[in-house]
Image (cartoon, coloured by chain):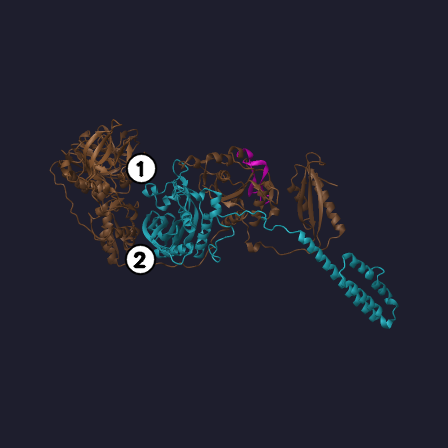
Chain colours: A cyan, B brown
Amino acid sequence: MSDIKNIRDQFVSKLKYELSLDEINSVKTELFGKNGQISSLFKTVGSIPESDRKSFAADLNKIKDELQSIISEKIKEIEIKEINQKLEKEKVDITLPERPFVRGKIHPVSQTIDEISSIFSEIGFSVEEGPDVENEYNNFTALNTPDNHPARDMHDTFYLDENKEVLLRTHTSPVQIRTMLKDKPPFKIIAPGRTYRSDSDQTHAPMFHQVEGLHIDKNINMGHLKGCLNYFIKEFFEVEKIKMRFRPSHFPFTEPSAEVDIGYEIKDGKIVIGEGDQWLEILGCGMVHPNVLKNVKVDPAKYQGYAFGIGIDRLAMLKYGINDLRAFFDCDYRWLNHFGFDPLDVPTNYRGLSR
Amino acid sequence: MKITFDWLKDYLTVSAKEEQLLEKLTDIGLEVESVANLSEGLDLFKVAKILKTEKHPNADRLKVCDVDVGEKEIKKVVCGAPNAREGLITVYAPPGAVIPKNKTKLIIAKIRDVTSYGMLCSESELNLSEESDGITELSSSKYSKSIGKSFFTQSSSNLIDLSITPNRPDCLGVRGIARDLAASGFGKLKQIKEQKIKSKKSQTVKVKITNEKNQGCFSFGSCLVTNVKNTDSPKWLKDKLISIGQKPISAIVDITNYVMIDINRPLHAYDADKIEKGITVRNSKSGEEFTALDNKDYKLEDDMCVISDDKGVLGLGGIIGGTRSGTEMDTNNVLIESAYFDPRSIRRTAKRLNIDTDAKFRFERGIDQLSIEEGLNKAAFLIKEICGGEISKIDIQKIRTFKNSIIKFDPNSFEKVTGFKILTKDMLKILDNLGFKCKKDKKVFKLTIPSWRPDIIQEIDIVEELVRIVGYDKIKIEEPIKERKKSTLTQTQKLFHFLQRSVASKGYLEAITWSFTDAKYNDHFKGQNEELKIVNPISSELGVLRNSIFSNLVMYMSKNIDRGIKDLSIFEIGPTFFGKQPGEQNIVACGLAAGKKSRLSWLEKERNVDVFDIKKDVVQTLVEAGYDSEKFFIDDETPDYYHPGKSGRLFLNRGKESVAAYFGEIHPNIIKQIDMKTESLVGFEIFLDNLKLPKKLLKDQKTKYSVSDYQKSERDFAFIVDKKINVQDLVNVISNVDKNLISNIKVFDVYEGDNIPENQKSIAISVTIQSQEKTLKDADLDQINKSIIETVENKTGAKIRS
């Protein structure tokens, strides 16, 4: 026993000094090498009298573990130290620029369409679509605007044939016709999309975006129309209160018809929606004309409802403070970058329309 | 429609302010477009007298005038008018005044070295008449005591411009607007008794309407006023016309304009002596010609309604008169026409000849058929009053008789549509004020529609009248119910939104460009499609529907590069067109990337964007959208606008049903032709309509979760193959060797050149082998190895590189 203890004490004190890796390794060999002191002692276990053998082996194992653990601790210490020394030489200028990344953006019109869809989704509207090229019937005649109607002059139409039978749709209203012809009432849809008029100046572009709304059921009246639009405008502009004015107007496909203005004021050069005493026209709407319902084989004695058409680009301009309509379609990367939205900013009901 | 409050007061007894008027007009659907003060600044124009004229020292035709403008100081004014002479009373405009005609603001100016303080004005410059040959001459008897006073009488009434909707022809007359206002409680309509012609003289110009098919004239009233002396209009009439921005011309013309605006009754005045043997209203014959009052020659087609005499066409009925029979200052005998023309006929003719006149605008909306006599009465008396002469009896020819229409109205329909109630009594009062005659018939009313309301045809029109007058603000708000019975978006729409954001998330800026494009650009990208011309494009640069989104994106990319950006990715998701019929369009997500990666990077070597960058974007986008890239099949057949060697076509599976996407470098010749200054240009097109929608919902797409924890081993192979062999085929062959054991294949090197025979290449592939059931033994691995090499060699002619 004393032999073992001596060896232990001797080496423990030896290992107390600061040693190099080589020195530690040589200590290790001295102890556990082929002819190392501990190894040699293990070889003697067999010759120990049976009565003492068990305790001898136990002591020996204990010492072996202790020394081994001291040695591996020692080695680890040195390795860490070495890493630390190395690290000091590895310092970079962390203010150097990161690897470049590029940010894509979603066009404000697309973002606005998603916002609109999200709002109307909450109150049960689903999204319908129709083609950009329309026939004369769906765009005008079915919408109670026959060829000789002066209201046609309100739409400067792009035609694709000399007979004026196919055209680029001048509004999203033909989607009403398509939807009602395809299905049976009730209908509760919105239809966002591209629309075209041969009109081009600072405030008009030959292509723009509209969203059509249509709600037909058994007892839908002008109060529902007002409620729906009131809800939409408040949600869209993310304001508590909104000043809204319904004004009588005329569209061949609705009757009674209205144009809707919202109140605004200019504060510090920016437009503030919902306050002030200025009015801004933002949409046209009305009760779907019985003639239109007849044209799509819906019985106006049983069903009635409202329709509306909103200029999407206009809404986007108002909400996001964009002044120039033409810039929407100019594809200037500076503009797209400035007014575009991060693709991860998906408007949703639970997260809110915008950050 | 331009009106003034003062003019309205001819028909309305009212004490309200203009502000309230404007509000009311808008509230009842007569939208106020703008309000302008026409007389603003006109007080600066003074009555002035020329005291002395001298020849301008440096110009033969100019004079220097000393002008008395009622101030102490005599003004020196340079004037070029031949009639500028001593003693003339005229109109003086000081520096700072704005000339009504050309809106220029006067300044103190040196004219050939002589300073001129202001200007002496011609009638034309003051918008008083067309007279521009000399300065205004004012009669000394009337004006000699007014020197220094304002020439224009101040009008306190602003010019109100209303946007009248096409269904309301009655409101194209001041009286109609007054009637609507009165019905809504804004003032009281004055009852003015119509003065009727009681003449014994007959109307001697014979009028005939031919009763033929498509006859556009239903009735034609006329009255002859003989021995008139046409003159300038009196001040009240001039002022009236000027107050709504019109220019007085001569008494006869001004009177017809006045009656038209006042009660929306278009008239036409002929010089009766220029009519050759009576008037025939008939259909035109193709080839007939005439010169209209707009001084244009028109060549007519068949079936246009013309007023003609023995010599030919005098004018287009209800649209425009001709120069041959127009009234002049020396006209002695005036024939006034007051007729009814069919709106459809008017519209058709005006469209075909491309004419727009005040009369046409009114007739195509529908004129009151019972206003023929009233118009003649009003005009004839005014002519007599101003120009003298004798009035004949009224002559009316007609081929159709007008009858007021009658419709039934159920008062309950009001609440059904508007959601609120008003008393039947109130309904009747409103209708009565609007000119309807109401008769109770059991539970409904029989309404006689006033002749000036051709827009009222059915019950809903009555509801609109009532709610319009009662006020839209009375409509109660019904809060919407938050309930969704049907999903908002279809699978296709969801895919659209997903791809849109997926592409953007890869660094692309989303653009929205026109659906039409420049034929020149479209030509490069139309592929097999035919060009789709727009008949009436806004400009030739926007003359065709786009066959591909590239035409616009490339053009705008080029512009952006010119703006100085070098590295840019843009995309658009929207329609492209392959035919002119509705529905002949595809939804395409089209992206374009230009320039370099890692330009001026301190970290990495810069390089051009290339086909594998764009391939990554396409494949990643499709994978993100839920398509299995293991099944993708790619070949190199692409449209001619792609680089023939560096572009590809992607199918969702080997069946090659329809093309999911094209991608690649844009053809260098196109870049050259459009002169785009970029190092590299790559693009893609993903065809949404060709992407089969996943049959399962996302929740069902997740298959059973199973992974293997058995040891995997990676083996590398290098094959030498013919250059024509695709890596895709090679990889396929390998994966088919043992689908259960081969879990991943990765191409890590492709090499051509030294040590490799010509027309061959070396492809290095790492294959991961792993079993789901056990740890593979060396023997198993060797077996697979052997199989891979044998199969590849057999199927592709490749040789394993040793």
Outermost residue on the front side: it is: B73
Residue B437 visible to an observer of this rendering: no
Secondary structure under the numbered disc 2 in the rendered image:
helix
- Tell me which amino acid carries mark 2: Lys
User: Picture quarter containing residue B413?
Assistant: bottom left
Depth check: A8 or B391 in front?
A8
Residue A353 drawn at (x, y percent): 46, 55
Marks 1,2: beta carbons within 8 A: no
**Residue at screen point 64% across, 51% down:** A91
Residue A6 drawn at (x, y percent): 83, 68
- Tell me which amino acid carries mark 1: Arg
Depth check: B162 or B6 in front?
B6
Outermost residue on the top side: it is: B60
Give the label on residue B348, or none.
1
Residue A216 drawn at (x, y percent): 39, 53
Is residue B668 rendered magenta in the image?
Answer: yes
User: Picture quarter containing residue A32?
Assistant: bottom right
Mark 1 or mark 2, earlier in chain: 1
Is residue B541 rendered magenta in the image?
Answer: no
Which segment did they paint magenta? B641-670
Classify residue B455 as left or right of residue A138. left
Q: Nearer the viewer, mark 1 or mark 2?
A: 2
Residue B467 drawn at (x, y percent): 29, 54
Classify residue B665 as left or right of residue A190. right
Residue with the mark numbered 2: B474
User: Picture quarter containing residue B305?
Assistant: top left
- The quadrant of the picture occupied by the N terminus of chain A is bottom right
